[in-house]
Image: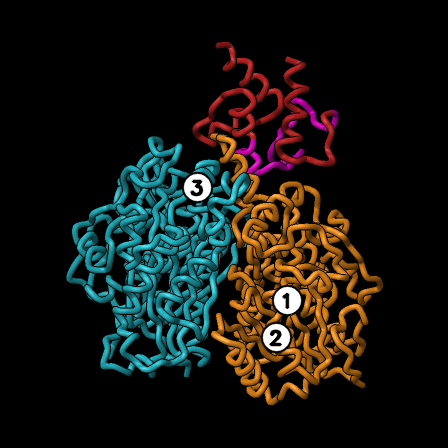
């Protein structure tokens, strides 16, 4: 029997809250973090809405507990804040030093500093301390150092499924006894680099995103960081602590169709969800709620919608995308939405798919549009499907102990 | 859990593209950085697909195809890539454009600049819907990919895996990173790299893909026994202990190693770690080095693994990679030990 | 118009990196997408950038691109019509 993997700590910072309590309060109020950019200086700031973390880097620096800005990228600061919260939430400092790893996900890495100082990099020596901050590992190593995690670390980048794959890898390493504890998740800061990139792909909506709506017109980019502490059941038994959820299943599949599109018949999404169920020894009727990837693009929502219908047939569970609340947090989306899914398990609720008005003619189901409370939710599936066809589905179960 | 190395595709600054030939000649360069010898990519990738591919993607897809052909594998059950920097060329194209005040970004370089595009485009070219992931952690990137593959086999989630390490260097990027003082500031001769005794590594690039199998085949190069990474040891003794413990967990001591491949890169500061281990823990071993052939890049241990696998297959060490001279009758166990700035350390053990 | 058509062919080849193709290989009226050159959605986006960079014409909705980029001729006609100002 495979080892159980449980979640003992949660940490998150996004446009809807600087920590878990604030995030939860926003969810209860269905308060979206989408609005204007205030901190990133972007040529697109008047054209599109964004879900920006409402703090500049100076404030993030003090929230992370530093006074010297050193060469911290925004990515790193967000990551330290969220991973730190998860670490403390799980009370890991008080416990015995078991084999602990950090698996972090990002795609932009230190690009926020790199794009700021690129001209200096080319012409002078005044910003040399930021040169080696550019790559993806920089934030991971700084986050690990902050928590004094040294047994294992790595960084994953699979676009929008990155953080989900970090959780998936963490679970596998725990199941095989290679690690006892893993802080897993992702961090992504808004940068002009990828704002311009998504704009060039013409998939940013001028209005706040409308997943699964017939008139949807694209993504609303967000930012933030989110981490879970995963532990083996045995390790989690120490310290008389609560489990917030169990990772019941996980599946990774590749669309292998096109660099920026999913197959219209939802093949990749279907495979990922099927694999997650299989790993968990579960069947479609076991799922109470799907926290969909639901980006609001033409392509994702039809592919994912069709895949959900193919898999669940007549018994489609509650479905919603929480991206109208948090924006699309790209490499951090997988762990942020895992956390939102876990909150649904813990608090007996289904989160709404805001901004939905008109059902898609191609689909039979409609997403949940208002917060539902006082409902038993035992099993949630959280989907994250990335550019390049990297599809991952995670299933969380309400703890039974 | 071990895995069998069944096929290799390596594009490097040496003549390594043909798996049937083991370093038929040594390429000598006096250069700012070592660049790969590009095969004729048109033989491996159809022109409609390749037209928008940067050099990095072509390197990746081609070396993956060579590895698969070498192993007689039609469809791997996992595709896992490690890359430290991804497509530097595409990223700097965008940054240069932004820096010049361009308002419009071209979508192609943006898509190509995402790190997972390599694994993704390999999967598209094969129509492979299996497990797919990308690791992007400096000089742990390739090792993380190998470790993931070994997990796949231990979970019985796959019977074959295509695993690669790929990175590129450009003049523009070198110009920038030279400012950090960690890279050679002037052109150097690669074969005399260690004679300079100056700070800074010689930069390079390469793409190495491997077909690993969970079960032996009649033609495997050797067995990938174990992979370990460790971070920022406080002192040399900690490094020594990590290596010793790694070997012990594989029922080996340092003396039982038939060769140790070390990641000397020409930087006098970080190379001192190898010097000290070379006269300590590895004192009695045949020591080899390889970065004079491929340069320093985050996934250069891909080149080292190619080297180790070929030594096991051919039972022969090319003299150009010998660091010292400890004669050996046969080669059974080879350890690759690499470290980047004495911060990121990795160990790969291969055996017959 | 003919001059524009020839210019466009060269620009399309360059923008889309159609290495082995020369302007003579592109038929002015043949579909660019689907068959023929076999262009795809990313190429459509690249052509949108081409139109904006080289001709100052902005296409907001990529779906409009289908008609405009049907062939070299339809591209030329669109440019001629919208560049009158």
Residue nearer the viewer, A246 or B112: B112
Residue A308 appears in the picture as rendered: no
Residue A71 appears in the picture as rendered: yes
Q: Quadrant of residue A211?
A: top left
Same chain for the residues under marks 3 and 2 in the image: no
Image x and y of residue B120, in percent: 56, 54
Q: Residue at x 67, y 53 (%)?
A: B59
Q: Which mark is residue A116?
A: 3
Instruction: Tell me if A110 is positioned left or right of B183 in this view.
Output: left
CA–CA distance in space, label 2 to label 1? 9 Å
Please name the residue that numbered disc 2 is placed on: B348
Instruction: Tell me if A312 is positioned left or right of A245 in this view.
Output: right
User: Element under label 2?
Assistant: strand
Please name the residue that numbered disc 1 is placed on: B301
Q: Which mark is residue A362?
A: none
Image x and y of residue A128, in percent: 49, 49
Q: Mark 1 packing: few (<14 Cα in 10 Å), some, or many (20+)?
A: many
Residue nearer the viewer, C3 or A381: C3
Q: Quadrant of residue A23?
A: bottom left
Q: Residue at x 20, y 47 (%)?
A: A31
Report the chain holding disc 1: B
Chain ID, red in image: C
Q: Mark 2 packing: few (<14 Cα in 10 Å), some, or many (20+)?
A: many
Q: Is residue B240 above or below residue A59?
A: below
Q: Which residues are magenta?
A: C24-46
């Amino acid at each position: 029997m495979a080892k159980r993997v449980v979640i003992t700590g949660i940490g998150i910072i996004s446009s809807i809250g600087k920590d878990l309590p604030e995030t939860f309060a926003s969810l209860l109020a269905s308060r979206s973090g989408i609005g204007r950019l205030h901190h990133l200086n972007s040529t697109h700031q008047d054209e599109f809405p964004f879900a920006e973390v409402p703090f500049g880097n100076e404030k993030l620096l003090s929230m992370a507990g530093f006074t010297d800005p050193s060469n911290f990228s925004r990515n790193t600061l967000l990551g330290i804040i969220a991973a730190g919260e998860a670490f403390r939430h799980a009370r890991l400092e008080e416990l015995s030093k078991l084999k602990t790893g950090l698996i972090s996900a990002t795609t932009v890495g230190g690009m926020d500093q790199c794009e700021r100082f690129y001209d200096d990099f080319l012409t002078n020596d005044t910003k040399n301390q930021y040169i080696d901050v550019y790559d993806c590992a920089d934030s991971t190593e700084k986050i690990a150092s902050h928590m004094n995690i040294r047994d294992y670390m790595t960084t994953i980048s699979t676009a929008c499924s990155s953080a989900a794959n970090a959780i998936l890898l963490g679970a596998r390493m725990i199941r095989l006894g290679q690690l006892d504890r893993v802080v897993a998740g992702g961090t992504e800061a808004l940068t002009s680099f990828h704002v311009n990139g998504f704009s060039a792909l013409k998939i940013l909506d001028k209005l706040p995103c409308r997943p699964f709506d017939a008139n949807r017109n694209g993504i609303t980019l967000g930012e933030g960081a989110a981490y879970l502490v995963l532990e083996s059941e045995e390790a989690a038994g120490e310290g008389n602590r609560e489990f917030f959820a169990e990772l019941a299943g996980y599946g990774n599949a590749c669309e292998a169709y096109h660099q920026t599109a999913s197959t219209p018949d939802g093949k990749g999404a279907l495979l990922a969800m099927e694999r997650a169920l299989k790993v968990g020894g579960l069947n479609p009727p076991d799922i109470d709620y799907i926290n969909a990837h639901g980006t609001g693009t033409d392509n994702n929502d039809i592919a994912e919608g069709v895949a959900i219908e193919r898999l669940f047939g007549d018994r489609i569970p509650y479905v919603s995308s929480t991206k109208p609340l948090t924006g699309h947090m790209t490499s951090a989306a997988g762990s942020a939405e895992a956390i939102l899914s876990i909150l649904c398990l813990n608090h007996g609720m289904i989160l709404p798919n805001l901004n939905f008005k008109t059902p898609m003619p191609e689909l039979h189901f409609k997403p949940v549009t208002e917060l539902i409370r006082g409902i038993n939710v035992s099993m949630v599936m959280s989907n994250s499907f990335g550019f390049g066809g990297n599809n991952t589905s995670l299933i969380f179960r309400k703890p039974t102990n | 859990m071990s895995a069998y190395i069944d096929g290799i595709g390596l594009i490097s600054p040496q003549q390594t593209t043909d798996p049937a030939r083991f370093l038929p000649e040594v390429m000598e360069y006096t250069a700012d950085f070592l660049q790969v010898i590009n095969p004729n990519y048109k033989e491996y990738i159809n022109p409609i697909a390749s037209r928008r591919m940067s050099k990095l993607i072509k390197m990746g897809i081609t070396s993956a195809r060579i590895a698969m052909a070498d192993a007689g594998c039609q469809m791997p059950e996992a595709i896992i890539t490690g890359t430290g920097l991804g497509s530097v060329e595409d990223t700097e194209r965008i940054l240069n454009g932004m820096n010049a005040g361009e308002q419009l970004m071209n979508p192609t370089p943006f898509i190509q600049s995402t790190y997972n595009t390599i694994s993704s485009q390999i999967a598209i070219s094969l129509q492979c819907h299996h497990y797919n992931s990308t690791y992007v952690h400096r000089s742990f990137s390739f090792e993380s990919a190998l470790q993931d593959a070994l997990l796949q086999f231990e979970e019985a989630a796959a019977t074959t895996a295509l695993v690669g390490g790929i990175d590129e260097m450009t003049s523009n990027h070198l110009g920038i990173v030279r400012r950090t003082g960690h890279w050679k500031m002037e052109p150097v001769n690669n074969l005399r790299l260690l004679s300079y005794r100056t700070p800074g590594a010689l930069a390079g690039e390469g793409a190495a893909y491997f077909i690993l199998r969970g079960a032996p085949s009649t033609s495997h190069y050797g067995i990938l026994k174990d992979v370990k990474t460790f971070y920022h040891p406080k002192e040399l003794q900690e490094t020594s202990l990590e290596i010793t413990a790694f070997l012990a967990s594989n029922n080996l001591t340092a003396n039982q190693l038939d060769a140790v491949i070390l990641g000397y890169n020409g930087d006098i500061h970080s190379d001192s770690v190898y010097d000290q281990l070379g006269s300590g823990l590895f004192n009695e071993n045949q020591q080899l080095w390889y970065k004079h052939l491929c340069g320093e890049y985050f996934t250069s241990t891909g080149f080292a693994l190619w080297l180790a696998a070929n030594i096991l297959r051919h039972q022969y060490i090319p003299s150009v990679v010998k660091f010292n001279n400890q004669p050996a009758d046969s080669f059974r166990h080879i350890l690759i030990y690499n470290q980047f700035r004495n911060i990121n350390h990795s160990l790969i053990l291969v055996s017959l | 118009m003919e001059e524009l058509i020839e210019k466009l062919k060269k620009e399309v080849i360059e923008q889309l990196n159609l290495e082995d193709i020369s302007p003579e290989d592109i038929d002015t009226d043949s579909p660019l997408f689907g068959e023929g050159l076999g262009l795809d959605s990313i190429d459509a986006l690249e052509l949108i950038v081409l139109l904006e960079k080289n001709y100052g014409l902005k296409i907001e909705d990529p779906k409009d691109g289908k008609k405009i980029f049907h062939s070299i001729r339809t591209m030329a006609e669109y440019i001629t019509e919208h560049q009158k100002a």
